[in-house]
Image (spheres, helix red, strand yellow):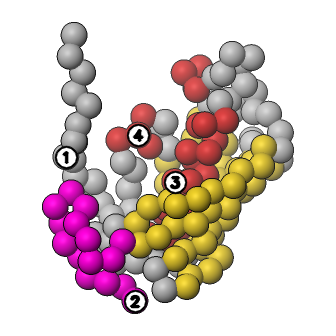
């Protein structure tokens, strides 16, 4: 059996929409505007770790994606950027339900964006605090597409 490991080409439904991995996690974008975003993700059995809790990687993916959508709400469509660092603090386990991430851009210095997100369980109890740094690409090609410098 041979697996197709890329490179992969696909088109997003819209500038602010879920990529294939986010669709796999059943992420829903409730809001993304003015540097803020709210996203949700259900706790499906496929997202459980060995003790039956929601896997930390799934929670981090939701938080990271929420910050991405907050940043996208401030940038022109087609801008390429990536997470360069992140810090996570796990606060409480998730055993069931749907988690919600509330994210915001907290600063921008040239091509550097800093974002924060808090993920909550169904009872609105914080389960994760997330902070990250993103960098917008400059004068380089990603997937063969050229784009302008945003400085």
Pinpoint residue 111: horizontal percent, then vertical percent. 46, 80
How far across and down, in percent of the image, does residue 60 sit? 62, 45
Q: Which residue is mark 3?
A: 65
Residues at discs 1 and 3 in contact (Cβ within 8 Å): no
Q: Kindly report the distance in space between the C-alpha atoms of the residues bearing marks 4 and 3.
A: 10 Å
Q: Residue furthest left?
A: 144
CA–CA distance in space, label 1 to label 4: 14 Å
Residue at x 51%, y 67% (from the top left corner): 134
Q: Position of residue 93 (x, y in %)?
A: 79, 33
On the image, numbered disc 4 is attached to which residue? 21
Extreme front residue here?
140
Q: Sequence order check: which comes first, mark 4 or mark 3?
A: 4
Which tag, 3 or 2, sits closer to the chain's start? 3
Q: Earlier in the sequence, mark 1 or mark 2?
A: 1
Task: Find disc 1 in the rendering and name its residue.
Answer: 9
Asked if the stretch drawn in magenta spans residue 16, the answer is no
Q: Magenta region: which residues?
A: 137-151
Instruction: Check disc 3: other Cα within 10 Å, few if <14, some if 14-19, many if 20+.
Output: many
């Amino acid at each position: 059996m041979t697996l197709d490991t890329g490179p992969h080409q696909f088109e997003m439904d819209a500038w602010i929409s879920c990529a294939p991995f986010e669709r796999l996690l059943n992420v829903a974008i409730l809001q993304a505007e003015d540097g803020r975003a709210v996203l949700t993700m259900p706790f499906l059995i496929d997202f459980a770790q060995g003790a039956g809790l929601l896997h930390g990687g799934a929670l981090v993916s939701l938080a990271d994606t929420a910050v991405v959508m907050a940043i996208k709400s401030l940038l022109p469509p087609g801008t390429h950027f990536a997470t360069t660092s992140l810090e996570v603090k796990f606060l409480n386990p998730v055993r069931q339900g749907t988690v919600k991430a509330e994210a915001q851009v907290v600063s921008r210095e040239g091509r550097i964006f800093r974002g924060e997100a808090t993920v909550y369980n169904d009872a609105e109890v914080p389960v994760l605090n997330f902070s990250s740094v993103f960098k917008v690409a400059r004068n380089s090609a990603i997937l063969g597409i050229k784009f302008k410098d945003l400085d």
